[in-house]
Amino acid sequence: MMLAALLAACSEAPSETPAAAAAAVSAPALVATAAPASMAPPDFTALVERVGPAVVNVTTTGARQPPDEAVAQAPEDPLFDFFRRFLAPARAGDSPREFRGGGVGSGFVIDEQGHVLTNAHVVAGADSVTVRLPGSRREHQARVIGSDPQTDVALLKVEATGLPVATVGDSSKLKAGEWVAAIGSPFGFANTVTAGVVSATERTLPSETYVPFIQTDVAVNPGNSGGPLLNTRGEVVGINSQIYSRTGGYMGVSFAIPIAVAMDVAQQLRTQGGVTRGRLGVGIQELSSGLAESFRLKEPRGALVTLVEPASPAEKAGLAPGDVILRFGDKDLGQAADLPRLVAQAKPGVEVELEVWRDGAGRTVKATVGAAPAPRQAERVAPPGGPGRQESGRLGLLVRELAPAARRALGVDYGLLVEGVQAHNADAPLQPGDVIVGVNNQRFTSLSEFHRHVEQAAPGDTVALLVRRDGASLYVPVTVAKG
């Protein structure tokens, strides 16, 4: 059964008055006490008394889209139900396409000027944002300074003085097994405290490009979003953001944005009004064992280039589809997901050295990082085939030459539309509707040329087919039939 990962964000506020927390923040960091002899968990009571007052309840009102409508936006996406945003259900009498409702999230004060960090999805679409400190019935109208959906970070500002301030820690020092605690407003119950351990760091999640998430087993529920994740010294090391769940509630797997990422975004939102990211201009994919073999790499690592955008920094640096980027600057790439983070962190205009694997050998190229444009959604293209289905016996594929109109739509000179996958390659990650445009990093302009490229491979070898799918490019490993 596919898991649904929910952003633990906006829940309908309950009618009960949320519980308030105690005492004020003091500047010195506080270490939670533990009982090592019995291996008992730390006592977080003193920590919560010191840090709790800086954690705020964030209430929003505005037009929202009901969950059913959101699901209807991309039913063909297999990951859409895997990671989706948590939205409160529409109430009776609301429009079926849009309703006005309230949401509850969390946040925390990061300076004496009244800046508050929370999640972008907590305040998305809000007409009004209200912040309430624990232990006080006084509410402050908050202004959204800026929001960055790509990292799910938002910066708010309240006009108030003498606010308690949370101490920011170093998320890079977190280790798996370390005790952590979360404070937030699950289901509107303010200053609720839960605790657990760090399960892993630098987690990569589907559709989340720029954030190396902290995974914990801390109980996080709708309304916790935007609240702090604390180490035992009372320092904020993350912002609680997402959960894995089959039910919509906590199931032992929670994710937080590292505070280093959040503070960098907050600083840019405050000083620039937006976030600037580096751009290389390549499409990439993960390298499987089969693809590594076809590219004569000893092990699958790095980022396989599937597309180079025209006039991009990558094209100017001489990168090409089929290159495997093994290092960016001084950072080795263990997996393809490492590259977008590193490129995004690079300042536009900076020259970076890349280690690239091409034609069975390593080489070094230099690229000048560009500035990333605002994100845009790719259009889905359904390429119709031309007449004459053909069989590629050695690969076990049924293919058809791409019609001229479809070639123009895809921006390719020639391609073969996959209509079926037979016997020995039945498990290959090819799909009907894929368009083959290259074999082992070589383009072809006719069916006979495609066959000649395939014939060069020995029986049992793996060839890498360059495929266009849903507007994106990717390499697919396919085995040449024996005998």
Image (cartoon, rainbow, N blue to C red):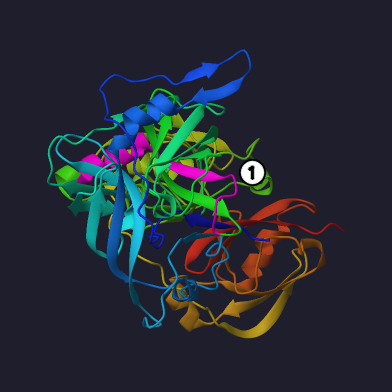
Q: Position of residue 472 (x, y in %)?
A: 48, 63
> Camera-side residue: 197 or 211?
197
Compared with 240, 120 (above or below) is below
Identify the residue at the far front of this view. 16
Q: Which residues are magenta?
A: 248-269
| Residue 423 shown left or right of residue 269 in the figure | right
* Image quadrant occupied by the N terminus: bottom right
User: Which residue carries the number 1 mark?
Assistant: 292
> Camera-side residue: 413 or 71?
71
Identify the residue at the far top of this view. 37
Secondary element at tag 1: helix
| Residue 339 shown left or right of residue 278 in the figure | right
Q: Image quarter for residue 411?
A: bottom left
Residue shown at the point (53%, 38%) measured from the top left: 216
Residue shown at the point (57%, 45%) measured from the top left: 253
Compared with 224, 94 (above or below) is below
- Dot 1: within a 10 Å radius of its alpha carbon, few (fewer than 14), some, or many (20 or more) residues? many
Q: Position of residue 83 (x, y in %)?
A: 51, 58
